[in-house]
Image (cartoon, coloured by chain):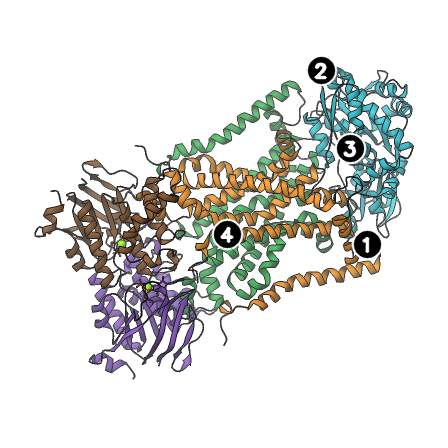
Chain colours: A orange, B green, C cyan, D purple, E brown
Amino acid sequence: MGRRIINRRPGKGGALFWGALPFLAVLVLYVTFSALRLAENPNDKLLPAFSTIADTVHRLAFVPDSRSGQVLLWADTASSLTRLGLGLLVSTVIGLVLGIGTGLIPYVRAGLSPFIAVLSLIPPMAVLPILFIVFGLDELSKVVLIVIGIAPFLVRDMAMRVEAIPSELVIKAQTLGANTWQIVTRLVLPSVWPKLMDSLRLSLGPAWLFLISAEAIAAQDGLGYRIFLVRRYLAMDVILPYVVWITLLAFCMDWALRYANRRLCPWLERGAS
Amino acid sequence: MGRRIINRRPGKGGALFWGALPFLAVLVLYVTFSALRLAENPNDKLLPAFSTIADTVHRLAFVPDSRSGQVLLWADTASSLTRLGLGLLVSTVIGLVLGIGTGLIPYVRAGLSPFIAVLSLIPPMAVLPILFIVFGLDELSKVVLIVIGIAPFLVRDMAMRVEAIPSELVIKAQTLGANTWQIVTRLVLPSVWPKLMDSLRLSLGPAWLFLISAEAIAAQDGLGYRIFLVRRYLAMDVILPYVVWITLLAFCMDWALRYANRRLCPWLERGAS
Amino acid sequence: LSAEKKDFKVAWSIYAGWMPWGYAADSGLMKKWADKYGISVEIVQINDYVESINQYTAGAFDGCVMTNMDALTIPAAGGVDSTSLISGDFSNGNDGIVLKKGKTVADLKGQKINLVELSVSHYLLARALDTVKLKEKDVSVVNTSDADIVSVFTSSADSTAVVTWNPQLAEVSAVKGATKVFDSSKIPGEIIDLMVVNSATLKDNPKLGKALVGVWYEMMAKMEAGDQGMLEAMAKASGTDLAGYKAQLVTTKMFYKPADAVTFTTSAQLPKTMDMVRSFSFEHGLLGEGAKTKDAVGIAFPGGKTIGDAKNVKLRFDAEFMKLAADGKL
Amino acid sequence: MSRVTVDNLWMEYGDQVVLERVNLDIPSGEFCALVGPSGCGKTTFLRLLLSMEAPTRGTIRVDGEKLSPEPGPDRGVVFQRYSAYPHLTVEENVILGLEFARAPLWGKLWGKAKRQAQDEVAAVIHAVGLDHAKSKYPAELSGGMQQRLSIAQALVRKPRILLMDEPFGALDPGTKAQMHDLVRDLWRAEKMTVFMVTHDIKEGFGLGTRVLAFDKVRVDPDEPQAYGATITLNLPLEDKAERAQVVQL
Amino acid sequence: MSRVTVDNLWMEYGDQVVLERVNLDIPSGEFCALVGPSGCGKTTFLRLLLSMEAPTRGTIRVDGEKLSPEPGPDRGVVFQRYSAYPHLTVEENVILGLEFARAPLWGKLWGKAKRQAQDEVAAVIHAVGLDHAKSKYPAELSGGMQQRLSIAQALVRKPRILLMDEPFGALDPGTKAQMHDLVRDLWRAEKMTVFMVTHDIKEGFGLGTRVLAFDKVRVDPDEPQAYGATITLNLPLEDKAERAQVVQL
Ligand SMILES: Nc1ncnc2c1ncn2[C@@H]1O[C@H](COP(=O)(O)OP(=O)(O)OP(=O)(O)O)[C@@H](O)[C@H]1O
Ligand SMILES: Nc1ncnc2c1ncn2[C@@H]1O[C@H](COP(=O)(O)OP(=O)(O)OP(=O)(O)O)[C@@H](O)[C@H]1O
Ligand SMILES: [Mg+2]
Ligand SMILES: [Mg+2]
């Protein structure tokens, strides 16, 4: 009927089809170029064939390492996820506390907001030596690098969201007798919670990036460590599945956050029609 | 009068004072620890004295380099800013086009949004070899790394903002006879423009980070190049002023974006009381 | 300033000649030797080589593995009086120059060369250029991180020449049409891998030196004997397999016997080598802006010989502890 | 011509039935006043007419053809909550409809074309009493001013069907009378079909040519959401002289 | 006791004078109906009484003391645009005032205390006719239902001064009458001082004990923003029996 394109919606199947399309395209591209390169040089390591990758994945994911008796992939995943989880947790708490603080309380804003703005602009990689001296080289420093990497973003984003709460709602809470703390718990927190989840989702990419960088500098296990280790041999048959695996993990987290948002914030869906 | 803390505002002077406080604190910390370390080892490189830094800055910023004949700081700044500017520009355009596309048009959303979500979660540093094949090693690949680093974030953020436009406003535009393109130019673009500026401000940190990382991979000039080069001999007297300089540049951009927002979007301030 | 202490930390990073340190930590040999002297030594692996030296220089570690050139330009130039406790090996083909276009060093002229600037690769390049009377001005150097050098050379047509070390060197040499035109076997004994410890700490705590040297030569003996378990563990830890690791060892001249290391360290060649290294470092500004001549940082050798400013000796080559090992007194 | 026919319409939100068995046949040009208790489904009915939502059952036809499934310039709307564009000034908000029609590419007029459009809307801006607030943004307007802005905005495109949800609710009696005149004149001139929700019965009977009352006929006290509202009264004001002139029966 | 005294009040937005020379002395317990043309400054006046904004000149005193510079539970408010909390259901929205008072730490009641609070507000929720929408979120309510929710929310804390901005504008006559009773009863019982903006003159005279009319007395046709509105009529309805009972002159 010539409807405007903004009013035309694909069905369930259609959405699946269109969603899968770009992935398929990438896959086809990969297979083609891999075959081309391998035809020229059967030992090419840059774009290994799927069979090679499958062998490597089998070895990484199912054969215990002779030295440590651990299965590498799972051991790496466990340590990386622990670091990442801790980093995200701490960043979230900082983002929430400082974000609400700077967004809501003028004095805190005056004191912290320029500092945090500047902090968020310092490239952490450039001051690594200082960070390592201050925080040591063990687990702490990796978590700290994640926190330094994403917490300022979360703080600033949260502050912006808090400032965007309509002033009527804050005023009304005060006429209902709320003190500052109650305004935080009953109005500000639930209002910015869904935005926090969204911001966290947007920070997942950077968080992994910082984790990998941290693990590449000082670690003895972890997904980033393994990638760093084999990178010198250009072992793309290890790197690619690791990257896919990292992306998959990140995607699951992304999905979980979205799901949590829907469950914890029913008002977002109700009445939106 | 015992006002709630959310209603108490510092005056202009107060804001300046509180804003400067954390910076002063960091400065004092630095001077103290620097003095302590220098007392132990007068040649300590980690936290050089301000006089050393000043000498180095003078050399970097005003004395032409003996090898290349250029004044290092300005040459580095020029190349880095060019790369960064290009990267930001391309990312902004991508963010705007794809963000509005995915946010507004259900078919585009179905096709691209999962792909972009996945893309944003792939750690770019881990797939560098593939980027090199596709984009080569020169300026292009550095710009591309910045784009890969921040464009997915911008796209996703823009899409979320577009989806947050009240449906009444979109419906009303249609009743006023707008076609899709007009809805984009007259409603969606002005609505998300201020958010785009905010998101860009939040991406400045990551953008610099990716620029510096890109310059660490293969470069002959640039602020990141210099930092990584002198990192080899822990020349913090070079690194620290460079970091401060980068932060200052980033802060100016941040300020410029905020200012542009205020100038281009007068409705944000008017009537907000 | 440093007093007697019990707990020490040394850092190491992944490189063919340093892999035994990882094995020492994992196998418990380090603990054995530390216990013997009533101290504890923690061996920390740091993946980023430069970061490990930086951390040592900043004082986070009592010792660290590094090359002779980095020992001079980072801790010594940074005012940290450092002592080379063990001369573990020298690069005998482990560092090299690989070209896609051209077959000889002279072909480097005018090319863009990917390497880690200011590292031993850079030094190797300078020495190679010397052999054909070229100057650094005749080439153009592109700083490229060691982790990316393989992918840069393999995947990009823009990259036609690289200088790097193993295992990256083996990977880039294997690229179709690539030629290795120069390697460190042509300048034997100039790129030396050391265990460096803080001089003051060592002076106050000779036990640390004894424990480190003791464990090192126990492992060297095992390695020389071809201990399969040890070699395999080290291969794995360096991210390759036994064959790959053995290939790397071929181009590494390990001093399995302490006596050989002592001979090397006390030889008259070492001061000459270090003089070349410091000249290179000075020309590239690596001795710091305060250094007006290459003599700014003094280097001491066994037997009391020094070069450079004798009042500012910051790098000391020591053979005493290795001698103890050679004499079986540990 | 825009005869609106509604055939056995049902609308449900989840398990709540809002509208049930709504049947209507409204001749073209009719000015319908919709009245009914708060929350009974008047706004929902307008949303259906606007294709903002699809009915659960039943159909809506305009001149015998199925209602276009998306909103378009044939149906203008004044929402219950004033909804002007916050990033446009009063004048820009009003001009917007003309710009969409005349500048297919960018939706923005420049230079002479723009000045001409400004002249055209000047009358309507004056009629709603916002001349002196022309260059204000909606956030700077009072509630009643925003409501008047919405009305002006909707009228500019002269839609064939005009849907208004309590358009005069926030206005004082004097201003309201002016608005009545404005809407009535336009309705007469353009012969639009108008649906206007109002809580002011007098306004309904005064302006309208037909009054539609919504209410529930069946109520289950335990499950109040089980039954919806329907049209309990459909009263053409046949004695109205205006009706004979405008409405095409 | 809450006598409101306004002394030579001016309010300007930029170069627009909105209110000028407003002088008032309202005895405690008075029910003031504020009327006036759209955009004349009634909402602005309420905002000033609420300390949402500071006057450009002049002072407001309550019982002789300067008005607290921040909103508090002594002054309740029903905004012109319904403004319930979108993340709370109807019942949670209404209970909120009690929770703030009784749970100083978290602002949230649990278990028995919560059930008791729910019982307490059940009456008011019933009175505004939202029993059956108790567990709906504001986005699921009709305009009139949201307005009633706002009223219920403001009444629960029984403020000494109640500010209402067109609280019954979106209600049908039947519901409106119920709301009138509800507010009148509470006003009588609590002897609140009420300021209510309304466009319904009949409502103003019916509910109020005093009518305040805002309008501009000076108008410069070229510069309409140069002069503001003031109180042109301050009419105590002294013949009202209720006034004698409640108002403390
Ligand atoms: N998105 C939604 N989800 C669930 N229920 C809804 C939704 N929108 C409206 N309702 C319900 O539908 C019913 C009718 O709402 P509607 O807005 O049509 O009422 P109305 O007649 O316009 O009332 P008013 O005069 O108060 O504006 C209400 O009971 C409301 O709770
Ligand atoms: N934030 C603001 N910035 C600038 N002008 C404003 C602002 N808020 C209100 N005004 C102006 O002040 C005047 C009075 O507004 P106010 O909202 O008080 O009117 P009102 O009497 O409540 O009208 P209504 O009955 O239409 O709600 C209006 O002309 C409006 O344009
Ligand atoms: Mg309605
Ligand atoms: Mg008002």
Q: Which mark is residue A44?
A: 1
Residue B271: image x %, image y %? 34, 50
Residue at 49% in and 70% down:
A4
**Circle 4 residue:** A261
User: In terms of secondary structure, where does tag 1 sit?
Assistant: loop
| Residue D111 position in % (x across, y down) | 41, 64
Q: Dot 4 lies on which element?
A: helix
Decide which of C292, C154 is in the foreground and name it. Answer: C154
Q: Which residue is mark 2?
A: C4
Quarter of the figure that contains the C terminus of chain D: bottom left
Q: Mark 4, mark 2: which one is toward the viewer?
A: 4
Q: Chain of mark 2?
A: C
The x and y percentages for residue C70 are 77, 30
Q: Which quarter of the rendered image does ligand 3 occupy?
A: bottom left
Where is mark 3, residue-wise? C26
Task: Say which of A211 and B193 sits in front.
Answer: A211
Q: Which amino acid type is shown beneath numbered disc 1?
A: Asp
Q: Amino acid at mark 4?
A: Asn
Instruction: Residue B35: tell me if it is visible.
Output: yes
